[in-house]
Structure formats: C-alpha cells, structure tokens
Image (cartoon, rainbow, N blue to C red):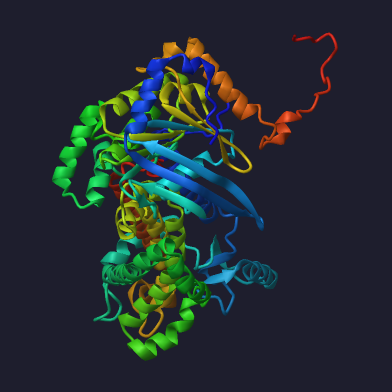
Amino acid sequence: MVKIVRTLSPKQTLCWGIASFILPLLVWCAVSYIPWIWHSQVMISNAGGVVYFEPHTRIERDVFDSEVRRMHKAGLAVPQGTPVNPVYLPAPHEVAKALVTAFTTPPAQPGDPWLHQSLWHSIKLVFWAFIISSLIGVPLAILCGFSPVMSKLVEPFVEFFRYLPAPSFGALAVAILGIYDAPKIAIIVIGTLFQQILIIANTTRKIDFALLEAAYTLGASRWQLLRHVVVPGILPDVYRDQRVLLGWAWTYLIVAELIGTSSGITWFITQQARYQNFDNVYAAILMIGIIGLGSDLCLAWLGKRLFRWDRGAKK
Amino acid sequence: MTAQPLSYYQALPEIRARFDHIYQRPVVLRVEHLSKSFRDQGQTKLALKDINLDIHRREFVCVIGPSGCGKSTFSRIIAGLEPYDQGVALVDGEPIEGPCRNRGMVFQGYTLFPWRTVRENVMFGPEMNGMGSRSAGQLANQWLDLIGLEQYADAYPDQLSGGMKQRVAIARALVNEPRLLLMDEPFGALDPHTRQKMQQHLLDIWKNIDITVIFVTHDMDEAILLADRIVVLKANPGEVVEVIEVPVARPRHPDQMFSPEFQAIKQHIDQLVHGAPVTVDEAIDHLPHIPRMTRVEDEVE
C-alpha cells in the first residue's frame, strides 16, 4: 500500500544512514583502486633512458606515454611505472592510516603542537565563540521576537550587518584584538551572531498565539508571559536552531584561524599541505567532520531527553 | 433587546419563578451599548452593534448565532483579549481593561501548555498570581481530584484525548476562582458522544461551583441543553436579535431534547438564526446545478 508519509523503523533509519556514508566512500574507492577510471598520472619506478625522469616521482600519463614511444623508437631503455592518481587524491586506506599516524607522529618542528593539541585548540575556539555569540544573540533574539519595538529597533541593522562577510573584518579584528585567539573568536562571533538573532527571533514569533492569550486570561503579566510561556514554548525549536548554528560556527573556524598567527587545525592543514602530505590533510578535514557530526548527534540525543513533551523532537 | 414572551413558557409558573429568582441575584456582567468595528481592506466593518446585556451571578448564558455574527468577538471582548470601541462593559461594576484572572476562558483549541504536565498546567494561574509552587501544586491536586483527572496529573497534554484536554483547560480556568467563565465553542472539536458527556459534566461543575458561565456555541441543542438564557445574535452587523429565557426545567438531561418545549424553542431559534433574510455566506443559498457527467443508465438514486 502507498503511504503518504513513510515512517522508517529505527533499523531502517540506521541502514540508510550508514548507506549515505558508504555510497561516497564507494565512489572514492572506485576512483582510487580501479586504474581505468581516472589514474591520470604515472609513478615512475624506472626512468629507463629518459634523462629528466626520476624514480618515485609522478608524471602526467600522456607525457609518460610519449616518452615510452620516443625511447622505443630510439632503441633506448623504456621507462617503467604504474598508473596512479595525483598526489592530492590519496586512497582511502592511506587516509585511514593517516588518521591514526597523524596523532602519533611528533610535529616536524620541536615546540609545534601535536595534532590533538591543534584540534583541541580549534574546539575551544569554536566553543567560546559560540558561547559568546549565544549569550548575546539568544536573549536579544527572543526579545526581538516578543516585542515589536525591539524587533524594529534591532533587526533592520542586523539584517544589514549579516551581509557583510565576516572574514572582511579580519584585519580590523587583528588591529583591535591582537594576533592570538581573540580576533579569531571575534570573526566566528561576527559570522554567527547576526544570523542567530534573525533565526531565533523568527522562531520566537512562531509561538502559538493562543497560548499567549490563554496565559493572559489566567492572570499572567507581560514579563511572566515571556518567562513562563514564550521561553519554555520555543525552547525545543531554539535548541534545534542552535544545533544548526553551531555548524555555521565551525565553517567560520577555518577562515578565523588563518587570521593573525595561524593556529589550530587550520595550521595543521596548511602545514601538511605545504609538505604535500595530502593524506594528513584529508585526515584533518575528516576529523572536523567527525567532531561536527558527533557533537550534533550527542546534542540531538540530549534534546530528545530534554524535551520529551515536544512532538517535533520525537521524529 | 426584544423580549417576546413565548406562549408555551407563560403556562409554566415554576419556570417564571426560577427566572425571577435569577434576576434577584446581583449582576456580574453589565454590557451597555457595546460596539466594536474592524478595519478590513480599508473598510470599517461593524462586528458588534449596540449590545445590551445583564448577566446575573451563577447564570448560565449561551451566545448563539450564524458564523460572522461576532459571538466569538463578544466573548473575547469580555475576556479582555480585544478592545471595544464604544459602550460599557462592567464586571462587578469594574470596567474591563484587558485580561484579568477574574474572567477565565476556555478555548476551542484547548491551549494547554504542552511543556507542562496536567498538574503544572492547572498550577499556572495560581503561580502567576504569586502562590508558591507547593501550595499551587496542592490546590491543583484538589481541582484535578474534583474533576476526576487525578491519575493523569503527571501526563503531558499530548497524551490526553480531546475531552480530557478540555477538562484540564476547565480546571485550569476554575482554579483561579474567576467570577466569569467564558467558553468559546469549547466542545466544537469533540466527537458527539464525548461532547454530550462534557455537556453533562459542565452542568455538574456549574451546579456545584460558584461560577457564572458565558458559553459561545453554534449548536442549538447544546445551547438549549445548557443555558438559562440564550442570546441570539445576527450577522452584519452583529446585533442581539432576542434574549430567550429557556423554559426547559432543570436539572437538564439529554432526554429532554425530545420534549415539546425543547423542540419549540429550537424551532424558534432556528427561525431567528436562519430565517433572517441576511446571511453571511450568500454563495450557500445559490448552489449551482451539477450537469450529469455519468452514463445515462448509471443511476444511483
């Protein structure tokens, strides 16, 4: 029978969720392990008669092929090699290995942070930036949603400000706040706060108006209405908004960390890219994804327990 | 207010005596020359025009009328949820200036706070009025006990059926001990069986608790079954056509629906509501003829 809304069992949900990760992984594996799909370069194992070839370097496939033909014609030793992908696309197993070894490999320069230290630094940065943004943004947004005067006083400017790209404040932030963590936090806050105010103000306005009327007839004052009806009523939706906004904060992290002295996971990524350790670069990017998804899953689980009464959260 | 005496009711001296008794009680709600207009697409529309009404303590008054007659607006004005343009509306001699705990309201949409348990919903009023949560909780328990919902005290509203939700909403309004209980089509969303039970339940509550009820409905049977008096409104503009003293003896029971006085009063209201030449929805009076779009031999009637 056709159902308008198909509900999936928890087992099915898990299966499809895993499949959504396995599918891109399969594509990656195919490109990495099946030679005729891409493998646009050749890893030279034996230079043969070609003067400028060096073993253990990569060369474009068409250059290699033409050199093979040239050597063949000249009667010289033919170069040998195996088709490979460019250095910027490591195979899954290399990245998987890098995920482990990146943590166990000491930093190239003594005194530089280990990967876990870089990661922890980034996590702290996002955490504090998001806390600061939320402490200002959430109460202000709820006030805007509740009071038309506040809404008209605050939101037009916020609407304007949110179009200004946060990274463009980089130089200014460094000039004002120095070169260490403060300007980075400021950039993430600028990137998050203004969106946060508008999103949560809109969520606040969506509260069921009939609940406010009912509270009024029960003798609630305007302040009590805000405290005892509006805030608890929108809390699950605000919580969901916050989860989305936390993701935004992470996206501003990479830009923010390039400002002043490069630090955290971004420093690690740029360093490794410089040494062409692209497996480590992918490992670090994956780490951000894993941390992001992991924290979101934790928050979703916590939300279900916090707001048992909310139908939306049960889905 | 044209009080046309109805012949069948003059023959019943005990009914007359009951109303004389009601009218001796103090007036809880006095409405004089109340008018209210809306602005709709640049035009001013009169929603309520010159409403005059006295409601006495412990009276049960139903407000009935076609859709668009302003019966909901009337209850919302009395609740203080909407301002009025002209006239006076006094509760115990005090003019209505916004919502107040002395006028409780029960809405068709239940409007229970979904994040509060049943008990916490009932506690809301006392808490807002400065009672500590312990004594508010005890008070809520008493009312839940009274209304027969004590075993659901810790349930959340979305675990309850429509009828139970409305019982909680009634308890939540009554715990404030209001002078007036306003009910805006409270049973409109319930199935007929639950609805009948709730009507009896409400009568039982009203009988035993010092409360004056204003009950808005569009269901004539419901109005006659519940009310002492029925205020019949007409639409465009919303005006009082007649205030009917219901001559059906109390205590009321659904079986009385088949009694001659019940049928007579129903017919009378029906005439007032639907017999009037003005209807809001004119399209319903001119329904089109549907051309046959099936085969000729494919007959259903």
> Is residue A290 rendered to the left or right of residue B126?
right
Relative depth, front residue between A300 and A219: A219
**Camera sees residue A275:** no
Location of residue B206 with respect to B177 vertically, above or below: above
Q: Which residue is drawn at 37% across and 78% down?
A: A186
Residue A272, horizontal then vertical, whole percent: 39, 74
**Camera sees residue B199:** yes
Residue reaching furthest right?
B296
Relative depth, front residue between B78 and B11: B11
Residue A310, horizontal then vertical, whole percent: 36, 43
Relative depth, front residue between B222 and A251: B222
Location of residue A223 with respect to B6 vertically, above or below: below
**Image quadrant occupied by the N terminus of chain A:** top right
> Is residue B282 rendered to the left or right of residue B262?
right
Residue B217, horizontal then vertical, whole percent: 49, 31
Q: Quadrant of residue B76?
A: top left
Residue reaching furthest left?
B134
> Is residue B280 rendered to the left or right of residue A150?
right
Relative depth, front residue between B142 and A279: B142
Q: How many labels does the image show?
A: 0
Location of residue B300 with respect to B280 vertically, above or below: above
Q: Residue at x 26, y 65 (%)?
A: A104
Q: Residue at x 64, y 68 (%)?
A: A68
**Image quadrant occupied by the C terminus of chain A:** top left
Q: Which residue is drawn at 65% across and 66% down?
A: A65
Residue A202, horizontal then vertical, whole percent: 47, 59
